[in-house]
Image: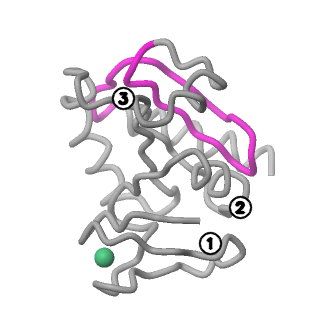
Amino acid sequence: MLLLCAHCHATNRVQEDRLNQTPTCGKCGRELLSGAPVAVDEAAFAALIERSERPVAVDFWAAWCGPCRTFAPVFADAAARRSDLVFAKVDTDANPDLSARLAIRSIPTLAVFHRGALIERVSGALPASRFDAWLQAAVAKAASKA
Ligand SMILES: [Zn+2]
């Protein structure tokens, strides 16, 4: 699968079965799945939510969406602080089939997946404190299902 480094924007090819060995960027050496949201396409999304041992928080967004731009720093801040989840972003315009399959009708839509299953999902830009509480609840729910 291809993962775009959130730190230097280099494209990295990562073996799917190595997703849980903290893959690092071939260019800048930083971890691909920690510290900052990683941009994923449909194939990378599918591999990530199936194979990640950590729950995956996903921000479904689009460049033209004002609330998405407002929410982006909240999502990035959570990614910088929390190591209990992987943070990924899906550009809904670039991935219309995935968006249709998941019935994403308004953006931003925020979702947490674990081992291929949807754990929690909410539409709309949450304030930072509510987003953090929502993540916490989703992590607890994911753990209880594991
Ligand atoms: Zn990099």
Dot 2: what SS?
helix
Q: Position of residue 61 (x, y in %)?
A: 36, 31
Q: Is residue 119 magenta?
A: yes
Residue at mark 2 to residue at mark 1: CA–CA distance? 7 Å
Residue placed under numbered mark 2 in the picture: 51
Asked whether mark 2 lies closer than 8 Å to ligand 1, one says no
Q: Is residue 53 above or below residue 111?
A: below
Question: How much space separates mark 1 and mark 3, taking CA atoms?
Answer: 29 Å
| Direction from residue 40 to residue 19 in the image, left or right | right
Which of the two labelled residues, at mark 3 and mark 2, occupies the earlier sequence position? 2
- The span picked out in magenta is 106-130
Residue 46 x %, y %? 66, 49
SS of the residue under disc 3: helix
**Relative horizontal placement of residue 146, taking residue 4 as reference (left or right):** right
Foreground: disc 3 or disc 2? 2
Quadrant of residue 71 within the rendered picture: top left
Q: Quadrant of ligand 1?
A: bottom left
User: Which residue matches tag 3?
Assistant: 130
Q: Residues within 10 Å of mark 2 (few under 14, many from 20)?
A: some
In the image, 88: left or right of 114? left
Residue at coordinates 39% horizontally, 80% vertically from top-left? 25
Q: Earlier in the sequence, mark 1 or mark 3?
A: 1
**Hey, what amino acid is under mark 2?**
Arg
